[in-house]
Amino acid sequence: MRTSRILLIGLILAAAAAHAQYQWVDKDGRRVFSDRPPPADVPAKNVLTQPKGARAPQATAAVGPSASASASEPASAAAGAAAARPAASAAGGVDKALEEKKKQNEAAEAARKKAEEDRVAAARAENCKRARSAKATLESGMRMARVNDKGEREVLDDAQRATELQRVNAIIASDCK
């Protein structure tokens, strides 16, 4: 019974030691989480959290007072790290995946605009073709009729023909460039 208690206490202590977590900001401004201490080139001011008694006294002294002084200072350190992150990625191109995604979005937007321009150009070409055909018919002198709002057929007189010819010429001027 006594050995099982000792074994249980030993397992609990081992689990607590395995749960030790370090958190620091690397040279690129990214937060790093690990169960191992940060490399020696990471300054003590960039170490955000660490297990108690796990690092040299200078690192503990640098982090300890800021952690106990106020709860807002770690937040300001995180904000400073977040502010440094965009500048580092813009200057050095750190986040290649983000830049690649941005380029793909720009290419997709350009392709969408090109397709829209092509669709508009095709519609204008079709309008131009129809307007030229209508102009040729109006200038031919043949009798023309159209259906009014009541569904009755009415023959175009010379004034209506001239008005319709002006409308068709305006369409040609705008769509046949």
Image (tube, helix red, strand yellow):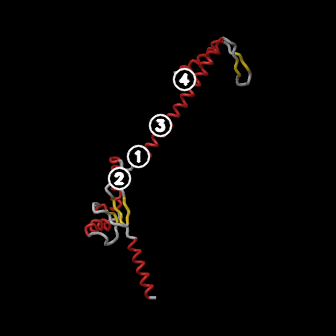
Residue in view at x 70 percent, y 13 percent: 143
What amino acid is found at the position of numbered circle 3 in the picture? Ala
* Residue 45 found in image quarter: bottom left
Foreground pick, 167 / 25: 25
Q: CA distance from mark 3 to mark 1?
A: 16 Å
Q: Residues within 10 Å of mark 4 (few under 14, many from 20)?
A: some
Q: Which mark sits nearer the N-terminus, 2 or 4?
A: 2
Which residue is situated farthest in the right direction here?
Answer: 152
Label 2, on which residue? 85
Q: CA distance from mark 2 to mark 3?
A: 29 Å
Three-letter amino acid code at the position of disc 2: Arg
Give the distance between the C-alpha atoms of the residues marked 1 and 2, in whole angstroms: 14 Å
> What amino acid is labelled 1 in the image?
Glu
Residue that carries the numbered disc 1 in the rendered image: 99
Disc 1 versus disc 4: distance between alpha carbons?
40 Å
Q: Report which quarter residue 166 is drawn in.
A: top right
Q: CA distance from mark 2 to mark 4?
A: 51 Å
- Above-or-below relation of 46 to 91: below
Depth check, mark 1 against mark 4: the one in front is: 1
**Secondary structure of the residue carrying numbered label 1:** helix
Viewer-proximal residue among 24 and 172: 24
Residue at image mark 3: 110
Which one is earlier in the sequence, the residue at label 3 or at label 1? Answer: 1
Q: Earlier in the sequence, mark 2 or mark 3?
A: 2
Q: Which residue is mark 4?
A: 175
Q: Residues within 10 Å of mark 1 (few under 14, many from 20)?
A: some
Which structural element holds mark 2? Answer: helix
